[in-house]
Amino acid sequence: MRSKLKYTLLGSILAVLLATTACQKEYYLDSGLSRPEFNGSMLQYLESKPVLFDTLVQVIKLAGLETNFRDSNFTFFAPADSTINSTMQYFNFELKRLGEDTISVLSDLSTEFWKSTLYNYMFRAVKGLEDYPQLDLLNKQAFPGEFSRSVGGRVMNIGGVFTSARGVKYQGYRYLNISYVPNEAAPYNSWIATRVATCNIKPKNGIVHVLAYATDVDDKIDGVGYGPHFFGFNPVDAWVLARYYGIKKQTN
């Protein structure tokens, strides 16, 4: 009897320990941080995640925006390094097609290009997921999200998307979506949508939402498809901007 009681008690203790450990996960289902505060600046947060943001940090420095990311308060939708690399690959494809030298280092592109493109991801108002209105990408008229101008003046759409659960619409988890709006005259047309993978990270200045990098064109949530994200949202527009500001030719 004592042996049976001993193992019953031991099993109960293990069950409690497992339950406690399970509650200490870093991320929720919607990828929002359970402990979102970061004891440092926004720049320090990005520097602390070199696997994701090593190239992004270089771009911030090339753009001359280190002080902004260290001291200013704003909302930043952070693109992963893979998105920058994909855009550079697109640029080099176009340069090869034109018979021109390809880009070998990030500094081949001008400060103005990096700054203008980064501005698309920066917003003056500090807002978390809970601060944005509901967005339904398949029913924009009913739930349009929020049109907002980035620091660079580009009109973007940002909203919280409510997923379905057990067949019931809008009853599932919520995630944040940001969309590039190509034409202000037709603001509901031809959006380039990108979902947020991790939201509401709170360094000492501002707030960071980390963008997802979908590599599968069939990646769908409730019928909404997400393709790969390119730095600048639209690689064609980014290419035109890069050519406008000029591409440097490195000499040995």
Image: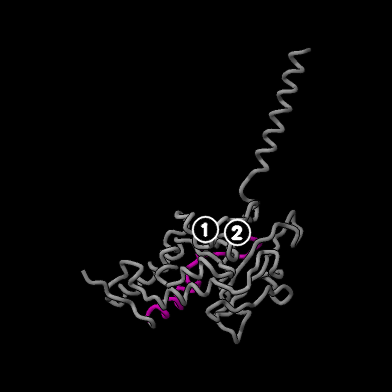
What residue is disc 1 on? 45
In the image, which disc is placed on residue 211?
none
**Residue on which the image places disc 2:** 201
Residue stretch rendered in magenta on the structure: 220-243
Q: Nearer the viewer, residue 97 or 114?
A: 114
Is residue 211 in view from this perspective? yes
Outermost residue, bottom side: 185
Badge 1: few (under 14), some or many (20 or more) residues near its Cα, within 10 Å?
many
Q: Residues within 10 Å of mark 2 (few under 14, many from 20)?
A: many
Q: Position of residue 139 (x, y in %)?
A: 70, 72
Q: Is residue 178 above or below residue 17?
A: below
Residue 57 within the magenta-colored segment of the rendering: no
Q: Quadrant of the C terminus?
A: bottom left
For mark 1, give the secondary structure. Answer: helix
Give the SS element for disc 2: strand
Q: Residue 135 falls in which quadrant of the image?
A: bottom right
Q: Is there CB contact under 8 Å for labels 2 and 1?
A: yes
Give the image quarter of residue 7: top right
Q: Nearer the viewer, residue 113 or 179?
A: 113
